[in-house]
Image (cartoon, rainbow, N blue to C red):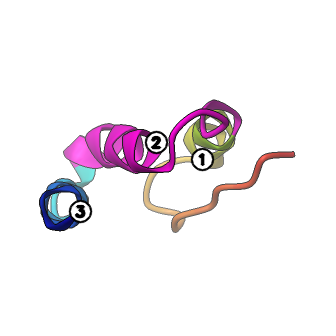
Amino acid sequence: MDGTIDRICTALAVPSRWAEAETAVGDAMGAGYEDAAVTTSRAGRGQGWVASAE
């Protein structure tokens, strides 16, 4: 799990790599994250981390 946390933190440090962070979180959470990732992408970059499986 430490490698996953490092992967997420490294990706979040650079806004252009936020999609990579979303993928890393999805990988860590497993199936069912895809809907939350779509909602996060629609929220727009730079507006905070908004993820919900609506």
Q: Main secondary structure of the magenta part?
A: helix
Q: Closer to the camera: disc 2 or disc 1?
A: 2
Q: Which residues are magenta?
A: 16-35
Lower position in the chain sequence, tag 2 or tag 1 = 2
Q: For residue 1, which numbered disc appears in the image?
A: 3
| Closer to us: 37 or 1 | 1
- In this image, 6 relative to 40: left or right? left
Q: Nearer the viewer, residue 28 or 21?
A: 28
Q: Is residue 9 above or below residue 4?
A: below
Picture quarter containing residue 35? top right
Quarter holding residue 2: bottom left
Of residues 29 and 16, which is closer to you in this image? 29
> Could you tell me how far apart the alpha carbons at marks 2 and 3 are, in whole angstroms?
13 Å
For numbered disc 3, what is the local secondary structure? loop
- Count neighbours of disc 2 (C-alpha within 10 A) and say few if under 14, some if 14 to 19, many if 20 or more: some
Which residue is label 2 attached to? 26
Secondary structure beneath label 2: helix
